[in-house]
Image (tube, helix red, strand yellow):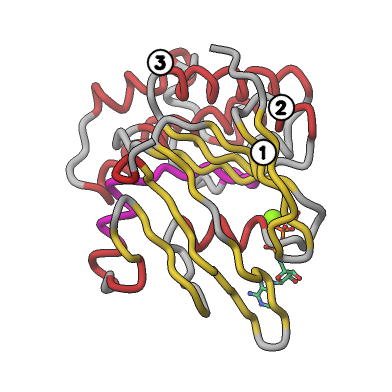
Amino acid sequence: MNKENWVIETRHLVKRFGQVTALDDINIRIAAGEFVAIMGASGSGKTTLMNILTCLDTASDGKVILDGVDAAQLNEEQRQRFRAEKIGLVFQQFHLIPYLTALENVMLAQHYHSVTDEPSATAVLNQVGLAHRINHLPSQLSGGEQQRVCIARALVNRPPVIFADEPTGNLDETNERLILQLLTELNQQGRTIVMVTHNPELGKLAHRTIFLQHGKFLHEEQHIKQH
Ligand SMILES: Nc1ncnc2c1ncn2[C@@H]1O[C@H](COP(=O)(O)OP(=O)(O)OP(=O)(O)O)[C@@H](O)[C@H]1O
Ligand SMILES: [Mg+2]
């Protein structure tokens, strides 16, 4: 594949927190349109890597190249714009605003990006199967429904890449399947997906799994593409 097609690349990435080396010489490339799983034991550096790839945190050493841009060269404003335009985030602990409805939570993401647009916020909630729940507060939604609001929120600004850190960690099996089906569909529609998971079965749904161990790249596995 031609180098211009790489959307995410790290070169000798190191992240230290005081005495702790959370990431140690990580060299990975994730191409546009890929569905990549990141696996590894607790403390292996998965969230740290996600935080750096999404510009929530910066590298201690090495380079992070996002869509051809060296992350270290971005100032705070450019970094925020990059995150708003290019990245959708889904977390294990949904991080929804408790006093806003599903629709308002999604519209808040639009507000941070540019302008609010109720029909398109409603459309993404419809896409995740929540058309009948748009006026519910998070506390009035099941865990699976809350996670689908989060996915709608991540999608609303049409980012090319979606990062999900243990998106099904708090869900039962039925909802886990629903969320994974949704992520797979989004990938089939052309979005790049990077998902952290503890579950090897979930990892196999991705095209490729990257394994981390004690902050180091251990190995990677290619899976047969389902599509
Ligand atoms: N802000 C921080 N300050 C100090 N140490 C940190 C910080 N964030 C992470 N670490 C350390 O870096 C290492 C990697 O942490 P990280 O959260 O990336 O692991 P993880 O693979 O996501 O684990 P889990 O599966 O439990 O979520 C751990 O040893 C952790 O204690
Ligand atoms: Mg983590």
* Residue 143 rendering spot, x and y as whole percentages: 67, 31
* Residue 142 rendering spot, x and y as whole percentages: 66, 27
Query: Which residue is denoted by mark 3 in the rendering?
Result: 126
**Above or below — where is 217 with respect to 143?**
below
Q: Is residue 97 left or right of residue 23?
A: left
Query: Which residue is denoted by mark 2 in the rendering?
Result: 204
**Above or below — where is 206 with respect to 59?**
above
Query: Is 165 or 111 nearer to us in this picture?
Result: 165
Query: Is 10 or 163 nearer to us in this picture?
Result: 10
Query: Which numbered disc, 3 or 2, marks the residue that appears first in the sequence?
Result: 3
Residue 84 falls inside the magenta stretch: yes
Query: Which residue is denoted by mark 1 in the rendering?
Result: 209
The residue located at (67%, 38%) in the rendering is 209
Query: Which numbered disc, 2 or 1, marks the residue that appears first in the sequence?
Result: 2
Q: Nearer the viewer, mark 3 or mark 2?
A: 2
Q: Are marks 2 and 1 in contact (CB under 8 Å)?
A: yes
Q: CA distance from mark 2 to mark 1?
A: 7 Å
Stretch in magenta = 80-94
